[in-house]
Amino acid sequence: MATTIDLHYVFYTAEPTRENWNKISRGHGCIEKFALGDSRVAKLLSEVARINGADPRHTEMWRLKEPKLSSPRQVSALLVANDHNITRIADEVVPAQLLADALGANWAEAAKQTIFVFFLPPAPTPKVKDDELADEEDDVLAGLYKGFNSFLSASASGPTPSVAAKSTEYNKIQGSATAILDGRFCVDGSATTAPPIELYHPAFSQFIAACNNSDPIPEEHLRLTSALMRKLSAIAESRRDEETQNIIDQLLGAALETTPNQDEWSADFCHLTATPFNVSAADLIVEVKAELGTDNLDPSVQSSFSFTRFWIHDVRKPIRDACCCPSFLIGLAGPWIIILAAVITSRPIVQRLTPYLWFGCSRALDDQQVLNLARPLYALKSALANLKDYYSSLQPIPRIDNRLHSRFCPSITQYRDRGKLIPFKYIRPLQRDATCVTYRIEIDGEPAVVKFVQQYSKDAHEFMAKQGFAPELRYYGLLGDGYGNLGMVVMAWVEGKTLYEVYGAGTLPEDVRTNVREALDILNQSEFVFGDLRRPNIMVSDSDQSIKFIDFDWAGKSEEVRYPFHLSSFIRDAAGAKEYDYITVAHQDALFERL
């Protein structure tokens, strides 16, 4: 029988400060008979937010350093005595943490006390927009929903995964408007790249982080990995046996099963998890081939189509309406295993989190191979537990006309500035391309811009902002473990239009060119360079017609910052730059001549 506990808490409708102390509401409550088990903090967060009518995406949870069965008045007195600084009396609890760990070793005693403090911002209400802005936003949102509905329609009437994954049909699909965004494209079709998938759900970044750490792995997991290698080393003429499946079940902590849709199709294996909608989600989908090349199919491609086939079914509409349907995928062929991640935005995004990993026992005296292969499987086990908790506490999202659905946005909705957590709300993407990572947002009702980047010159941006040639930079920081070198930029919103929006490809007025040149000269005098000098990256402010540079990804000290790989042909041709070149003033000036 599952262990249950009563959890007492107090809450405030915002993080207390000296300025807002008399404006925010406060209260207390108790979650009775909460199932402990392997529950994550995120599940409790969602439940408390639901009960109190709060926005779960922006809810914070803190653990009192000295728990007491006390009233909100007593906790408030403690806050006042500590200058309204929550960090002096409590520690913030991470949503991915196990609730049992957050409670502490003596959890039975802790459950008798008030140990948690919640900040519960009310669920946001829509605001009336300016007519022109509303038309622009509606147009962008309409395009996202149109793409999403077109994908659903095309997939529902499309071929089964085993047919879709064959090269001829795959090429046809990838050349269409409903292609899977997996990086594979038809020669005459559009690009199929997408933003890093870890931006859409923290389970993916958790997996990546765990693959790259050096934490010890349980010995039993290592033994199971060794056993799997021995099983997969045997050449198979048909699909793997039940013993192999049982080993994988134990390695992942997930009982795999074959569950057909109502259309009689099913993936080779799925791991289903319960949701509050009375319909199961698939946090893991697996496709298996006897050997690589069997049936002329790549199981990683087939698993992508199996993912879409599972999620487009009408019975799963309540889950689709509440999230981006995050799932892990596995392709297994002979001794080869690959792990992927998938979500659905306006179209499916599928990305390989590992290469095909060789699980064959081909080398004697090579224990290190077992250690190396055990880590991604152990990382996947932990990430699947996270995803299971996410689905078990998933809540419906009220449909509000002209509101951007969260499936179209990254899962990151807050940043910490000088110790204070700043929540924000996505309003719309600022580009129509599938690779868009720049959004208009709102912070306390005020417009701003958030952008996700792999490199950024904070110094160049701040320098130009001080000169009046860039928006105020509110924040820049790396996203943390599991996100590699991905960072987040938050800047002030500027009312205005880009040079491209105003002039298209036509000739720029001489005074505009002069203003841009003067701004570049000031930048260059401090040894900075602006390596992406194109019309979409320069704005004209409505208020005073001043020039604003808005993209500092490829900016920094001359000959210290590099262009990325996969550089666009325009930059290569116009600037005379090569992939991964150091950016120079000569590159910048060549772009200016083409501006």
Image (cartoon, grey):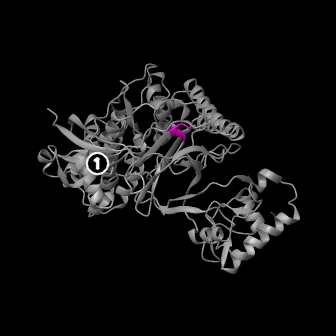
The residue that appears at 69% across and 52% down in the rendered structure is 495
Instruction: Locate residue 42, reporting x and y percent.
Output: 33, 43
Q: Residues within 10 Å of mark 1 (few under 14, many from 20)?
A: many
Instruction: Locate residue 346, reporting x and y percent.
Output: 58, 37
In the image, residue 364 above or below residue 37: below
Left or right? Give the position of 186 relative to 247: right
Left or right? Give the position of 146 relative to 278: right
The residue that appears at 66% across and 79% down in the rendered structure is 527
What is the quadrant of residue 553 in the picture? bottom right
Looking at the picture, which amino acid does disc 1 mark? Val
- Front-lying residue, 455 or 53: 53
In the image, residue 158 above or below residue 190: above
Can residue 424 be seen in this snapshot? yes
| Quadrant showing the C terminus | bottom right
- Front-lying residue, 123 or 155: 123
The residue that appears at 21% across and 41% down in the rendered structure is 8
- Front-lying residue, 455 or 239: 455
The residue that appears at 63% across and 64% down in the rendered structure is 552
| Quadrant showing the N terminus | top left
Considering the whole magenta stretch, tell me its main secondary structure.
helix
- Front-lying residue, 516 or 566: 516
Instruction: Locate residue 438, reporting x and y percent.
Output: 60, 51
Q: Report the label total.
A: 1
Q: Give the magenta-colored segment's residue range.
A: 404-408
Instruction: Locate residue 59, reporting x and y percent.
Output: 38, 45
Residue 385, magenta (yes or no) = no
Can residue 337 be seen in this snapshot? no
Secondary structure of the residue carrying numbered label 1: strand
Residue holding disc 1: 117
